[in-house]
Amino acid sequence: MPIPEGAETHSISLRIRRVTQEYAYVNVPVVGDVVKPDEQGVKRFDFGELTRKAIEMSQSGEVVWYPEEQKTEPHPLQKAPDEGEKRFPF
Protein backbone atom coordinates (compact mmCIF):
# COMPACT_ATOMS: atom_id res chain seq x y z
CA MET A 1 0.00 0.00 0.00
CA PRO A 2 1.75 3.19 -1.13
CA ILE A 3 1.93 6.03 1.36
CA PRO A 4 1.86 9.54 -0.06
CA GLU A 5 5.26 11.23 0.12
CA GLY A 6 5.58 13.51 3.12
CA ALA A 7 2.51 12.05 4.84
CA GLU A 8 2.76 11.44 8.58
CA THR A 9 2.30 7.76 9.33
CA HIS A 10 1.95 5.53 12.33
CA SER A 11 2.22 1.77 12.48
CA ILE A 12 1.55 -1.16 14.77
CA SER A 13 3.94 -4.11 14.89
CA LEU A 14 2.23 -7.50 14.73
CA ARG A 15 4.15 -10.68 15.40
CA ILE A 16 3.44 -13.37 12.80
CA ARG A 17 4.92 -16.81 12.33
CA ARG A 18 5.57 -18.99 9.36
CA VAL A 19 5.32 -22.72 9.94
CA THR A 20 6.83 -25.12 7.42
CA GLN A 21 5.90 -28.79 7.54
CA GLU A 22 8.07 -31.38 5.86
CA TYR A 23 7.95 -35.13 5.54
CA ALA A 24 10.51 -37.89 5.08
CA TYR A 25 10.57 -41.67 4.89
CA VAL A 26 12.77 -43.80 7.15
CA ASN A 27 13.09 -47.59 7.06
CA VAL A 28 12.94 -48.94 10.61
CA PRO A 29 14.59 -52.35 10.95
CA VAL A 30 12.22 -54.98 12.38
CA VAL A 31 14.48 -56.06 15.23
CA GLY A 32 14.59 -55.87 19.02
CA ASP A 33 11.74 -54.12 20.81
CA VAL A 34 9.90 -53.26 17.58
CA VAL A 35 8.16 -56.66 17.73
CA LYS A 36 6.75 -57.90 21.03
CA PRO A 37 4.54 -60.87 21.93
CA ASP A 38 0.96 -60.13 22.99
CA GLU A 39 -1.01 -61.96 25.73
CA GLN A 40 -1.35 -65.07 23.53
CA GLY A 41 2.33 -65.04 22.59
CA VAL A 42 1.65 -63.79 19.05
CA LYS A 43 4.35 -61.38 17.88
CA ARG A 44 2.99 -57.93 17.06
CA PHE A 45 4.49 -54.63 16.07
CA ASP A 46 4.87 -52.14 18.91
CA PHE A 47 3.76 -48.97 17.12
CA GLY A 48 5.07 -46.74 19.90
CA GLU A 49 8.53 -48.27 19.61
CA LEU A 50 8.38 -48.09 15.79
CA THR A 51 7.59 -44.38 15.87
CA ARG A 52 10.19 -43.69 18.58
CA LYS A 53 12.89 -45.33 16.45
CA ALA A 54 11.67 -43.58 13.29
CA ILE A 55 11.87 -40.19 14.99
CA GLU A 56 15.33 -41.02 16.32
CA MET A 57 16.48 -42.10 12.85
CA SER A 58 15.02 -38.94 11.29
CA GLN A 59 17.61 -36.83 13.15
CA SER A 60 20.33 -38.10 10.77
CA GLY A 61 21.69 -35.53 8.36
CA GLU A 62 21.29 -38.10 5.58
CA VAL A 63 17.47 -38.10 5.75
CA VAL A 64 15.87 -36.35 2.78
CA TRP A 65 13.03 -34.04 3.79
CA TYR A 66 10.35 -32.89 1.34
CA PRO A 67 8.22 -29.74 1.73
CA GLU A 68 4.59 -30.48 2.48
CA GLU A 69 2.92 -27.27 3.60
CA GLN A 70 3.76 -23.75 4.61
CA LYS A 71 1.41 -21.36 6.33
CA THR A 72 1.71 -17.89 7.78
CA GLU A 73 -0.47 -16.92 10.71
CA PRO A 74 -0.62 -14.43 13.57
CA HIS A 75 1.65 -15.57 16.39
CA PRO A 76 -0.44 -16.58 19.43
CA LEU A 77 1.87 -14.53 21.67
CA GLN A 78 1.97 -10.88 20.69
CA LYS A 79 4.82 -8.85 22.16
CA ALA A 80 6.96 -5.88 21.29
CA PRO A 81 10.02 -6.66 19.15
CA ASP A 82 13.20 -7.32 21.11
CA GLU A 83 16.09 -4.91 20.61
CA GLY A 84 17.77 -5.68 17.31
CA GLU A 85 14.83 -7.60 15.82
CA LYS A 86 14.03 -6.18 12.41
CA ARG A 87 10.57 -5.15 11.26
CA PHE A 88 9.15 -4.72 7.78
CA PRO A 89 9.18 -2.24 6.23
CA PHE A 90 12.57 -1.32 7.63
Image (spheres, helix red, strand yellow):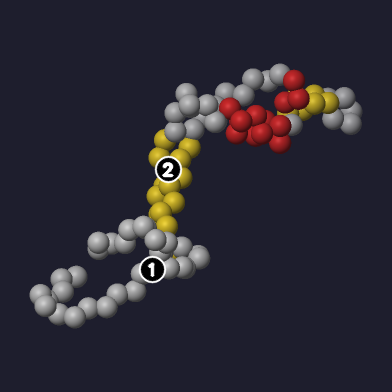
- In this image, 42 relative to 81: left or right? right
The image position of residue 25, as x and y in percent, is 51, 29
Q: CA distance from mark 2 to mark 1?
A: 26 Å
Q: Quadrant of residue 17?
A: bottom left
Direction from residue 69 to residue 2 in the image, left or right: left
Q: Secondary structure under badge 1? A: loop
Residue shown at 15% from the left, 80% from the top: 7
Q: Give amino acid for label 2.
A: Glu
Q: Nearer the viewer, residue 80 or 62?
A: 80
Q: Amino acid at mark 1?
A: Leu
Residue 22 lies, in percent from the top left, at 45, 40
Q: Position of residue 24 (x, y in %)?
A: 49, 33
Q: Quadrant of the C terminus?
A: bottom left
Q: Residues within 10 Å of mark 1 (few under 14, many from 20)?
A: some
In the picture shown, does residue 46 fall above or below 80?
A: above
Q: Kindly report which numbered mark, 2 or 1, lies closer to the viewer in this rendering.
A: 1
Q: Position of residue 78 (x, y in %)?
A: 47, 68
Marker count (numbered): 2
Query: Can residue 16 be seen here?
Result: no
| Residue indicated by mark 1 | 14
The residue singled out by tag 2 in the image is 68
The residue shown at (38%, 68%) is: 14
Q: Where, by quadrant of the figure, is residue 47 drawn?
A: top right
Horizontally, is 90 left or right of 74 in the view? left
Which quarter of the rendering shows the N terminus?
Answer: bottom left
Foreground: 85 or 51? 85
Q: Earlier in the sequence, mark 2 or mark 1?
A: 1
| 79 relative position to 38: left or right | left
The residue at the point 27 percent across, 78 percent down is 10
Q: Which mark is residue 57?
A: none
- Which residue is at a point 36% across and 69% down the rendered structure image? 13
